[in-house]
Image (cartoon, grey):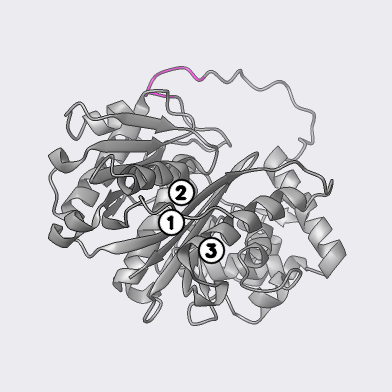
Amino acid sequence: MPKIPPKLRDVYVVGIGMTPFARHEGKTVVDLGSWAIRDALADAGLPFEAVEAAWCGHVGQGSTAGQKVVGAVGQSGIPVMNVENACASGTTAFRGAYMQVASGLADVALAVGFERMGRGALPMPKTPGEKSETPPPKQEPSKKPPPPFPSLFAGLFREHSRRYGTTVEQMAKVGVKNHHHGALNPRAQYRDEVTIQQVLESREIADPLTLLMCCPTGSGSAAALLCSEDVARQAEGEAIQILASTLVSEAANTAGDALHGVVEINARAAGMAYDLAGVKPEDIEVCELHDCFAIAEIVHYENLGFCERGEGGRFIDEGMSAIGGQVTVNPSGGLLAKGHPLGATGVAQVFEIVTQLRGGAGERQVRGAQIGLTHCQGFGGATGVHIFSR
């Protein structure tokens, strides 16, 4: 198991910013990204000139989108790294900024994630008016096949159900919980409470997954300023320490089953993070995890060690992941309610955990939270896990 080399420095988050997640019709990715960066700078009380490097996570916005976004705030000639790593793009950008500060190559680094998406599964064209590189859809038969990712997670549910008895109603409870949390979050894309019956009766996407068990598409951005301990002492924003940063890719699939790709990589990343931080799963009080589909949250309860393998359904049944439960999971509303602009998600998770550890989450605040965790999986794949402490 890898250990932190002695030369790595302590790293802190001192500034955070985030747009609401929404359709944002008429706004460009530059509008959204620069909005979040300016808010993070204001939160930290630092000028843009203090930033020595920028890591920009996005999926379909163009190879130099980061330069355009950062340049709208200021052009100081700093290195700007564009990161594309599927849904883990924002998490990977945050990891890059962390390593830059931890290694001593920078005292202040910016992590920003952004995405501008349409109503389909793909990001919007790179700039307004530019034609998409995606060819027009072929003529479909009268009944369209389900989309690939919902189909994959529908298969994951069937395998988890076969092994452990997980039910569709338990998936619906995840949707109810996260929409309840989202209703308390002014930045969430969807702020409506839903019932179990509404989740079950919403439009079928990939049997048995319904619309309210699947994350929506949307647009938005989030940013975080990371810094050394010396800078953290001088910054205006309350500093939150990063105890662990891990990023892993998939190992060889020797299991050959539907669960493997959503178990091995995530459990391994989490185990490494706990070892690096010197904490255990039971120490985590608040968590933002990658609930792209309701079944993913149930399986990730197990992957992150919050319950035993196969007990994820019981965990949601008993309210263990709701505000006030054993560990509050996705108080932001998660991907299901807060939304999932692909490149923005990983940094938006950091925004929520830092807000919680500062005690500033309002109606969705987890009382007395001292240790939090973010988890994001880019399927196909990469997984990043970060642990934070007040």
Residue 333 at x, y percent in the picture: 48, 63
> Badge 1 local density, few (<14 within 10 Å), some, or many (20+)?
many
* Residue 157 sits in quarter: bottom right
Residue 390 at x, y percent in the picture: 33, 70
Residue depicted at x 57% and y 21%: 134
Amino acid on which the number 3 mark rests in the picture = Asp
Helix, strand or loop at label 2? It is helix
Q: Mark 1 sits on what residue?
A: 349
Task: Work out whether residue 90 or residue 337 is closer to the camera in this orientation and state it.
Answer: 90
Between disc 3 and disc 2, the foreground one is 3
Q: What residue occupies the far right of the structure in this picture?
A: 162
Helix, strand or loop at label 3? It is helix
Q: Mark 2 sits on what residue?
A: 345
Residue depicted at x 13% and y 59%: 234
Q: Mark 3 sits on what residue?
A: 275
- In space, the residues marked 3 and 1 are separated at their CA atoms by 21 Å
Q: What residue occupies the far front of the structure in this picture?
A: 6
Residue depicted at x 46% and y 64%: 277
Looking at the image, residue 198 lies above or below residue 7: below
User: Closer to the N terminus: mark 3 or mark 2?
Assistant: 3
* Residue 366 sits in quarter: bottom left
Amino acid on which the number 2 mark rests in the picture = Thr
Looking at the image, residue 183 lies above or below residue 346: below
Label 2 close to label 1 by CB (< 8 Å): yes
Looking at the image, residue 121 lies above or below residue 279: above
Q: Is residue 367 left or right of residue 84?
A: left
For the question of whether residue 84 can be seen, the reply is yes
Magenta region: which residues? 126-132
